[in-house]
Image (cartoon, rainbow, N blue to C red):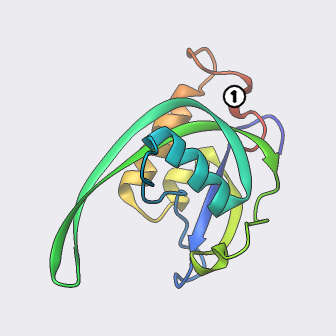
Amino acid sequence: MKGRPWLAAVRPQGKPAGVWALPKGLISSGESPAETALREGFEETGLAGRLVSKLGDIRYVYSWQGERVFKIVSFYLAESGRGRIGELPAGMEIEVAEARWLPLAEAPRLLAYRGERQMAERAFELLAPGRAGSGSAVSDPL
């Protein structure tokens, strides 16, 4: 797995095989979006990490119990630290069926949701050789 960037992805519970998404979740009271990204990344993948940079936000509207909900999701590029992919904290199997590494170069094809594919493309561009921020940030799996 060395030598190219990797992406920690999840298959949400209840989704069929092959439906891959990025870790994400609701902001807890008193928590910043960046803190949420680190917490959710750990809860949903089993990996602790360090944020490298913000990739951007996705905005969308969906219906929940007859109400229209406007949602903003912030995504960050992170470097992996301790932990093993798929070794989730107790109770997280309610949300996550599976967590695994995906090659970042293939993420725009493998991720199920358009906005998340765009975030993966931004991460790939940031990590391209010769770009600022490139290098060892994710030369090993995140």
In the image: residue 89, left or right of residue 120: right
Q: Which residue is mark 1?
A: 137
Q: Nearer the viewer, residue 22 or 18?
A: 22
Q: Residue at x 68, y 65 (%)?
A: 99
Q: Quadrant of residue 79?
A: top right
Which residue: 76% across, 65% down?
86
* Residue 124 x/y as whole percent: 55, 35
Q: Does residue 116 appear to the left or right of 133 in the view shown?
A: left
User: Which residue is found at the position 46% from the left and 65% from the top?
Assistant: 112
- Whether residue 111 sits left or right of residue 130 in the image: it is left
Residue 104, x across and y down, in percent:
62, 45
Name the residue located 24 percent from the left edge and 58 percent from the top edge.
60
The one of 122 and 30 positioned closer to us in this rendering: 30
- What is the x, y in percent for residue 133? 59, 19
Label 1 packing within 10 angstroms: few (<14), some (14-19), many (20+): some
Q: Position of residue 77 (x, y in %)?
A: 56, 36
Compared to 111, does 29 lie above or below? above
